[in-house]
Amino acid sequence: MSTPAGPPPSSGEHGFPAHQAPRCTELAALDAAVVGCRACPRLVAWREQVGAARRAAFRDWEYWAKPVPGFGPPDAALVVVGLAPAAHGANRTGRMFTGDASGDFLFAGLHAVGLASRPTATHRGDGLELYGVRVTAPVRCAPPANRPTPAERDICRPWLAAELGLLAPGLKAVVALGGFGWRALLPALGAAGWPLPRPRPAFGHGAELTLPAAGGRPELRVLGCYHPSQRNTFTGRLTFAMLVELLTRARELAGLPAGPKGP
């Protein structure tokens, strides 16, 4: 005699993402479920503390202070995976990479290669559109010191795995920003159904990996790119020319045209 299943985990329990994410059959439902997640107490406390205290420059803002869903069309052929929302960036604006220096650098690059309608991102209603590309992260809440723990990364993984699975029919390429993004992305791709090589390849700027088609998943190209953090851009480790070159390569692998550019 089978044991009856217990009640589903609440949004404040560690099992919530693993229970909820696989049940979402479209990205809109997944995004809505992500926003309600409270599975990591340290991250919940931090994102809400930052939203209540606010930075002086944003004193008049009502901070989002919730998990941040991915941003971009539901039929994206290219995904860009970062690290986590910035405390006064996406945690303030509620949209990935919007409102901080890293996002300014990234969206300017996407605009330069024809994948974004404008080179800047300031708030959710600013009119920015992405063409064939979606930006997301393996950790959906702003972490203290921008450093999520391995446990927080793993608890959050089902959201990214489900997102990649829903995008799978048309997904052709993924760009991982930084070593954290690369290391967090590969297990999520495995959980979404792509076979992973062993040993796992190391991260590097310009690194490329081809995951073969399997289980109804098409072949997928994975690229590594230095994260557009100010530490990397100020020191020249990642120049704008380097970012544009890599995003151009990703756009071509994804089969995307250079879309119309806005202002």
Image: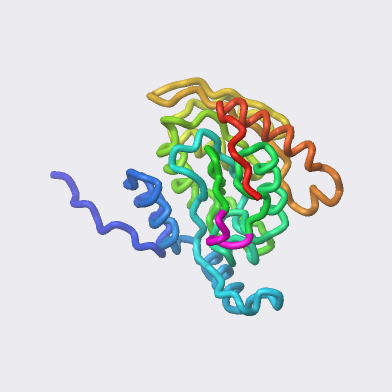
Q: Position of residue 178 (x, y in %)?
A: 69, 43
| Dominant secondary structure of the residues highlighted in magenta in the image | loop
Q: Residue at x 74, y 51 (%)?
A: 229
Q: Position of residue 54 (x, y in %)?
A: 64, 76
Q: Residue at x 70, y 78 (%)?
A: 56
Split into 4 quadrants, where in the image is the N terminus? top left
Magenta range: 122-127
Question: Closest to the observer: 42 or 255?
Answer: 255
Scheme of image coloration: rainbow
Q: Position of residue 167 (x, y in %)?
A: 44, 37
Q: Is residue 158 magenta?
A: no
Q: Residue at x 73, y 33 (%)?
A: 204
Q: How many marks?
A: 0
Q: Which quarter of the figure has residue 99? A: bottom right
Q: Position of residue 37 (x, y in %)?
A: 43, 61
- Residue furthest toward the right? 235
